[in-house]
Image: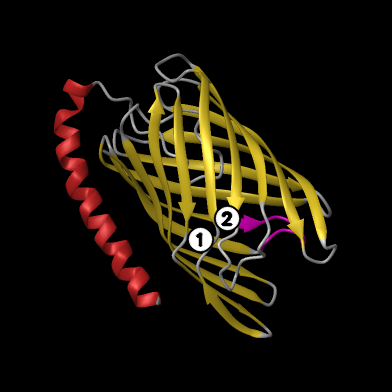
């Protein structure tokens, strides 16, 4: 199963790269917006995908380590489609996850997350942008699923400080199932990210992530992006826990392409 997931991931990357080159040559004619990805940082972009176009955001491989816990996630993908000039529809799914605990190893697919991003302002210019991003997790009954419906609402905001520096932040309310309590919990997540454009192709970011609900979790994150073309971007990043309640460490690498 893992080998199949890796093959699919590589095939997707090759086809995405080929497709991005053709679209890049036509960008001036089509008048597409610049690439605005929800990855690699946790702060989502308020910019939506152009109407009638697709965007693929794939994390080729994720690794997470915590006390007595390790996880590998392969080819988790956010598939987006521009429904209108200010709205896109998103589907998030991971074809293979392997989790290792002191009790053994479990693997399987993820549940399906469906999201709808609606931009309120800033889609086509201006210093700032803001959007509404409600989402729902549909259980698919896999070995790693809790077989419960979950959901939430994300409020992403961005601001261009100048030609090099940018700032983003978001609030997220999530309604998730707690196995230990056999009931639902409400959590509030906060992020703030500072990005810097080193050149036309290279960029870096630093981010803070906080999660309330139970013991407060604080994380620091950072990463690098590389623009192969204006519509195809590679990335790599990591997240480190800043207190005992937070997950110790995770790292990831992937790509974004619009076509």
Q: Is residue 109 above or below residue 246?
A: below
Residue 8 in the figure: left or right of residue 140: left
Name the residue located 58 percent from the left edge and 67 percent from the top edge. Answer: 141
Q: Does residue 39 appear in the picture of this structure?
A: no
Q: Within 10 angstroms of label 1, few (less than 14), some, or many (20 or more) residues?
A: some
Image location (x, y in percent) of residue 205: 49, 41
Mark nearer the N terminus (2 vs 1): 2
Q: Which residue is mark 2?
A: 239
Q: How many marks?
A: 2
> Please, which residue is most extreme toward the top here?
126
Q: Secondary structure at mark 1?
A: strand
Q: Which mark is on residue 251?
A: 1
Q: Within 10 angstroms of label 2, few (less than 14), some, or many (20 or more) residues?
A: many
Magenta segment, which residues? 240-247
Image location (x, y in percent) of residue 2: 40, 76
Residue 96 in the figure: left or right of residue 106: left
Name the residue located 68 percent from the left edge and 84 percent from the top edge. Answer: 102
Q: Secondary structure at mark 2?
A: strand
Q: Does residue 62 appear in the picture of this structure?
A: yes
Q: Which mark is on residue 163?
A: none
Look at the numbered discs 2 and 1 and tell me whether their residues touch, using CB distance below 8 Å: yes
Image location (x, y in percent) of residue 179: 78, 65
Is 106 or 171 nearer to us in this picture? 106
Name the residue located 55 percent from the left edge and 62 percent from the top edge. Answer: 140
Q: Please tell me whether residue 197 belongs to the stretch shown in magenta.
A: no
Is 159 or 176 nearer to us in this picture? 176
């Amino acid at each position: 199963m893992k080998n199949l997931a890796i093959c699919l991931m590589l095939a997707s990357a090759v086809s995405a790269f080929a497709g991005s080159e053709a679209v890049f040559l036509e960008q001036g004619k089509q008048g597409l917006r610049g690439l605005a990805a929800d990855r690699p940082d946790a702060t989502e972009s308020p910019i939506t995908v152009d109407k009638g176009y697709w965007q693929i955001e794939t994390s080729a491989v994720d690794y997470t380590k915590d006390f007595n816990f390790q996880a590998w996630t392969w080819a988790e993908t956010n598939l987006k489609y521009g429904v209108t000039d200010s709205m896109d529809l998103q589907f998030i799914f991971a074809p293979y996850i392997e989790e290792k605990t002191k009790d053994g190893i479990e693997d399987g697919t993820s549940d399906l997350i469906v999201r709808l991003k609606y931009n309120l302002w800033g889609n086509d210019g201006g210093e700032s942008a803001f959007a509404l991003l409600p989402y729902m997790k549909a259980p698919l009954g896999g070995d790693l699923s809790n077989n419960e419906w979950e959901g939430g609402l994300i409020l992403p905001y961005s601001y261009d400080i100048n030609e090099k520096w940018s700032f983003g932040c978001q609030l997220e309310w999530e309604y998730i199932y707690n196995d230990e309590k056999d009931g639902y919990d409400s959590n509030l997540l906060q992020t703030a990210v500072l990005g810097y454009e080193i050149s036309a192709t290279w960029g870096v970011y630093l981010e803070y992530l906080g999660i309330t609900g139970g013991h407060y979790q604080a994380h620091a994150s950072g990463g690098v992006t590389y623009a192969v073309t204006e519509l195809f971007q590679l990335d790599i990043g990591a997240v480190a826990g800043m207190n005992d309640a937070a997950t110790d460490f995770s790292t990831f690498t992937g790509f974004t392409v619009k076509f």
